[in-house]
C-alpha cells in the first residue's frame, strides 16, 4: 500500500489503508474519544505501516497559534547569548513551541528586519535583546496580538515586559571588592557606551568609587569593543601612575585583557569558561544568562496564555565569585 502513495501520506491514505472513516483517523491522531480500542489499533497499525506524520502546522493554525516564537539576540556565537538561547528553547519545548532565532550584530536595522521577518511568519511572540532604543515599529504587531519581552536591555516601549540583570549593583560589588583589598587606582574597561549594559556597569564602577571617597580618573576608563582592550590596558599600565587593579565590563573584554599577559588584580563582569582553571583563577561578578532566558521565556508564555496586568520589569541578581585574581594586593 505504501508503495502506491505519492509524496507524504495523508489522513485520507490512513483511512483507506485501515478501512475506516476519515473522522475516525482524525479522532485517533488527535487523541479524541469515541473510537473503540480495536478500531484505534487498526488506525495505529496503518499509521505505522504508511509512515504517516501529523501536520502540526495545520493543526496549530486551526487553533489560532503557530507554536513558534522569535528570538533576536546580539550574537549567537557569544557564549552569554548562547546560554540565553538554550534556556529560551527549553521553555519553548515545555510549551510545545519552536524557536526561530537570529543575531542583530548590535545593528538596530538588522534587529528590525529580523523581528518583522519573524512576524511575517506569524510567530506567537518575540523575545528581543534590543540593539537600539526605537521600537515604534513593533506597535502594529503588538496591536495585532503578538506578545513581546525585552531581555538583557530595556527597549523603547514601556508597555513591553522587560527582564534585566542588576548591572549597576553587580559592578558596584565587584569594584568595592577591589577597594576592600587595598586598591585605589582601578581601571574600567567596558564595551561601547551606546550599549545599555555597558553604561550601567560604568555607573556601578563610578558609584563604588564615590562611596569609598575615591575620584574617578577618566584616564583609567576606556569604552569600546574588545578589539581595543589590549592596547588600552597596555597604555594604562605603562603610564607614570598605573592602575593596580582592573574591572572589566563583560566576558569578552575580560578574556582580551588576560591575553595581554599583564596580570594586575582583576574582577570581571560575567563568568566564562575556564575562569576557574587559570592561575590565579579569575574573580567574576556572575549573572545567570540561563536564568535571564528562562525568565523572559516564562513571562512571554504567561502572556500568551492570557496573563494580563501592567508590563513587568524584572531585575535578576548577580553574585561575586572570588577565585584569586580579585584578591591580589596592590
Image (tube, rainbow, N blue to C red):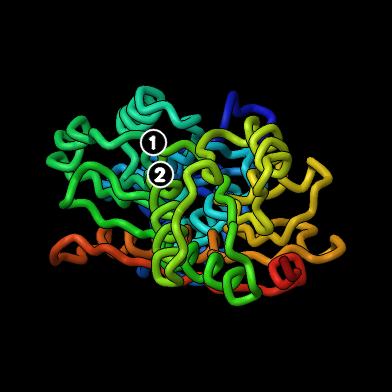
Camera-side residue: 100 or 10? 100
Q: Is any atom of residue 11 visible in this view?
A: no
| Residue at (31, 28) in percent of width and height | 116
* Residue 291 in picture, x, y percent from top left: 50, 66
Question: Could you tell whether 240 is left or right of 285 in the image?
Answer: right
> Is 310 placed above or below 233 here?
below
Please, what secondary structure does the residue beneath circle 2 have? Answer: loop
Res. 213 image quadrant: bottom left
Label 1 to label 2: alpha-carbon separation: 14 Å
Residue mark closest to the camera, 1 vs 2: 1
Neighbours of disc 2 within 10 Å: few (<14), some (14-19), many (20+): many
- Say which label, 1 or 2, has the lower sequence index: 2
Residue 43 shows which numbered tag? none
* Residue 119 in picture, x, y percent from top left: 31, 33
* Residue 120 in picture, x, y percent from top left: 31, 28
| Residue at (38, 64) in percent of width and height | 298
Res. 17 image quadrant: top right
Camera-side residue: 148 or 287? 287
* Residue 254 in picture, x, y percent from top left: 67, 49
Residue topped by disc 2 = 129
> Is 205 placed above or below 124 here?
below
Residue topped by disc 1 = 194
| Residue at (44, 58) in percent of width and height | 215
Q: Is any atom of residue 188 visible in this view?
A: yes
Amino acid at each position: 500500500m505504501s508503495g502506491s502513495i505519492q509524496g507524504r501520506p495523508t489522513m485520507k491514505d490512513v483511512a483507506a489503508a485501515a478501512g475506516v472513516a476519515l473522522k475516525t483517523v482524525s479522532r485517533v491522531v488527535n487523541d479524541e474519544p469515541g473510537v473503540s480500542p480495536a478500531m484505534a489499533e487498526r488506525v495505529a497499525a496503518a499509521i505505522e505501516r504508511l509512515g504517516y506524520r501529523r501536520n502540526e502546522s495545520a493543526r496549530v493554525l486551526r487553533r489560532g497559534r503557530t507554536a513558534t516564537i522569535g528570538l533576536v539576540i546580539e550574537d549567537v556565537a557569544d557564549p552569554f547569548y548562547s546560554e540565553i538561547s538554550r534556556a529560551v528553547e527549553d521553555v519553548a519545548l515545555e510549551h510545545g513551541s519552536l524557536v526561530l532565532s537570529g543575531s542583530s550584530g548590535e545593528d538596530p536595522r538588522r534587529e528590525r528586519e529580523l523581528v518583522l521577518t519573524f512576524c511575517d511568519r506569524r510567530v506567537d511572540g518575540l523575545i528581543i535583546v534590543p540593539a537600539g532604543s526605537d521600537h515604534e515599529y513593533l506597535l502594529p504587531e503588538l496591536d495585532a496580538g503578538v506578545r513581546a519581552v525585552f531581555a538583557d536591555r530595556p527597549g523603547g516601549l514601556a508597555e513591553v515586559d522587560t527582564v534585566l540583570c542588576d548591572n549597576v549593583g553587580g559592578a558596584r560589588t565587584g569594584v568595592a571588592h577591589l577597594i576592600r583589598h587595598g586598591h585605589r587606582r582601578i581601571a574600567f574597561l567596558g564595551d561601547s557606551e551606546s550599549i545599555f549594559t555597558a553604561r550601567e556597569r560604568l555607573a556601578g564602577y563610578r558609584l563604588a568609587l564615590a562611596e569609598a571617597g575615591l575620584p574617578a580618573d577618566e584616564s583609567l576608563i576606556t569604552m569600546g569593543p574588545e578589539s581595543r582592550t589590549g592596547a588600552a590596558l597596555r597604555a594604562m599600565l605603562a603610564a607614570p601612575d598605573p592602575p593596580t587593579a582592573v574591572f572589566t565590563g563583560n566576558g569578552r573584554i575580560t578574556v582580551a585583557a588576560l591575553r595581554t599577559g599583564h596580570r594586575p588584580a582583576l574582577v570581571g563582569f560575567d563568568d566564562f569558561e575556564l575562569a576557574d582553571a587559570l592561575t590565579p583563577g579569575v574573580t567574576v561578578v556572575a549573572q545567570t544568562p540561563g536564568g535571564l532566558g528562562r525568565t523572559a521565556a516564562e513571562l512571554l508564555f504567561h502572556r500568551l496564555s492570557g496573563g494580563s496586568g501592567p508590563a513587568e520589569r524584572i531585575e535578576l541578581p548577580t553574585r561575586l565569585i572570588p577565585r584569586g585574581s580579585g584578591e591580589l594586593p596592590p
